[in-house]
Image (cartoon, rainbow, N blue to C red):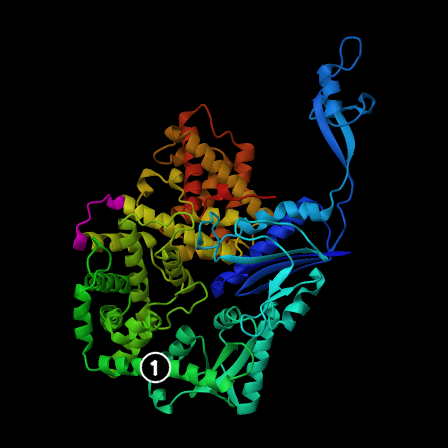
Amino acid sequence: MNTYLLEIGLEEMPAQMILPAVEQLKSLVQKTCENHQLSFDELRTFSTPRRLAVQINGLPDKQEDRSVELKGPPAAIAKDKDNNWTKAALGFAKKNGVEPADLQIREYEGKDYLFVQRIELGQPVPELLQAQLEKWISQLNFPKNMRWASYRMRFIRPIRWIVSLWNKTVVPLKLEMVEAGNETRGHRFLSSGKSLLKDAADYQEQLEKMNVMPDYEKRRESIVSQIKTLEQEFGFVVELDEKLLTEVTNLVEWPTVLLGDFEEEFLELPSEVLVTSMAVHQRYFPVFRKNEKQDSTAKILLPHFVTVRNGNSNGLDTVRRGNAKVLRARLSDARFFYLDDQKKSLDEFRQKAENVVFFQQRGTQGQRVQRIADLSVFIAGQLELSEIQQKQVRRIAELSKFDLETQLVQEFPELQGLMGENYAMLKNEDAVVCRGIRQHYYPRNAKDFLPEDAESVPAALADKLDLLTTAFSLNMIPSGAADPYALRRTAQGITQLVLGLRLPLDLRELTSAAVRLLDDQQDLALDLTKLQNDLLDFLLQRQRWFLQERGIRYDLIDAVLKTPVAIQSKQEKTARPALAIEQLSFAEFLGEHLETDMFKRSVEAIVRAANISNKYADRIAEELNESALDLSEEKNFLSALQPILNSDSQALWSPDNYLQQLRKIEPVVTRFFEDVMVMDEDPVKCGNRLWLCQQLAQWSGRHLDLQSIVFA
């Protein structure tokens, strides 16, 4: 069996783009193999900052021959009146390299056609792969590309070399800037540079001899293993953030872990400042005291750091001192900013925000904070928080953005919220207010925490709603992959707060309040109804995604999210729509009952009632004439409807009560449709029966659009 290797050598790539790129390359190779029926034993990928590679092991010499069936012209024009083959038939046979005698007539989709079977000889695999190589490279997609020198091709970084080997033979490929060969390159500093690769199967082994570890997982394991060794030797714990570990692994070709130190005096800084300085800015791993009691809240930072060198252990002390020097400068700046910030009051920082533009044409950061505060208090009222809590909510909102004007956060933007909490505590603000300044940013992504304090929730919602509303008012609505202000993530945060915390909030009221506050302050010359509808549609998409992530069926999601306008009567246009948490509850509860026979029959009966009352809306009685109910089926229908008719027309039933009502009413309604002619010639009887159907449909429609339910 054979091995093929493709290696693309580049200038150093951004670490975050390496793994997605090599996955794309793997996918393109797999697709080629599938399309050409190529079997193989193993497909391996390799990647470092300077190379992307794919190795296919166990390939055959050539494709297998295969029998191909081809459809030709209709049989009606294949033979003349003397039963001889026509020019159309002879041309079809000649085109496909067969004798006329080999033509067959068979039926296809009700008509007879000519068919021919022929053997297609398999291509040599190296030739087949050669035809695909340029596509594999050119179809790699990166967030940003560059063009260099006079070349037309765009790529993430300049391509410096290409290895294309079938076993020991070069498979030719020429891009405008480089020609493929069997010459690879080792570590930039630990090898002599270029080296001939004798066999595609020896790729990993030969690169490791040149101080390059091309296997991502092996590099990662090496880093983790070296860190574990340090932990055992010195008795501390190194915090391995997965994102940072992935980035560091993609920054080096030959990893060597080293331990460095910084001065203990810097431990007086908040630990978040130290960790951010190390992890985010220097790609160092922070070191903590070993916690024998396994208490996760007692993490004590030590004056050490762990970093990974792209090289061997030679001159490690020099490297260690250099890394410590860079970190010391960072921490010195942070300490100066931290101490200097404390000399100012919180209100001084808030005043500075009055001169900072939030969005062009939408005021300053100070004006935004005022909107957040007003919207937060509105939300707090909707959540029925106490008067004391509402005061704390307003204070959280008023202080929510002050730390953006501090020197430390301007130097370390990742610390927004955290430093706001810290500085507020130093100024003796209430503990719940301090926590709220940090928690109002939650959730920052799909897997993030939700606010723990009830007082933090209104500001968390208001912050995201105001950002979304302001952006939409400027027509900054995400389209396709473009979302420069992360508005989808913002909308997802609103959905996570409302549904994750099961808040009894109406998104229509929230968006209406957000739009009103923005308009009152900025005097928008816009169609405010359209603006609110655009916001609701956008949030509905995020709500749908949230339900899908919970494993809820797509048709049930449609059923709970659609607005059943068509089955509301004039009198019920003011009926309260379902809240998002009520829709979630219905979807979760009914998901367990969708396939029961009772539910299927109920859906069929109610959908039938909705359809007939919609179709003949002009014949529905305005009021029920109970004296005209002659048939027992009509009376039973009315009796079964009584719990519905006696309930508040604006109230929504719980999922359990809704299902219980279905169980009671389904057999009555089914019998009604089996034995009663709804469209009776007597207008009174017809109007009564349509009225009954309408009442049932309207009640169910406030909860679910049953027409969306699909049964197998």
Taking 201 as reference, is 690 above or below it?
above
Name the residue that disc number 1 marks: 329
Along the viewing direction, whichever of 406 and 193 lies nearer the viewer: 193
> Is 270 included in the stretch rendered in magenta?
no
Q: Left of 93 or right of it: where is 462?
A: left
Residue 429 horizontal/vertical position (percent): 24, 79
Callout 1 crowding tier (Cα within 10 Å): few <14, some 14–19, many ≥20: few
Q: Residue 76's quadrant in the figure?
A: top right
Magenta residues? 520-529
Along the viewing direction, whichever of 242 and 665 lies nearer the viewer: 242
Which amino acid does the dot numbered 1 rest on? Ala
- Quarter of the rendering occupied by the C terminus: top right
Residue that sits furthest to the right in the current view:
101
Residue 399 horizontal/vertical position (percent): 24, 71
Q: Residue at x 57, y 89 (%)?
A: 232
Q: Residue at x 27, y 82 (%)?
A: 336
Along the viewing direction, whichever of 213 and 433 lies nearer the viewer: 213
Along the viewing direction, whichever of 12 and 532 lies nearer the viewer: 12
Q: Is residue 578 visible?
A: no
Q: Residue 324's quadrant in the figure?
A: bottom left
Q: Left of 82 or right of it: where is 296?
A: left
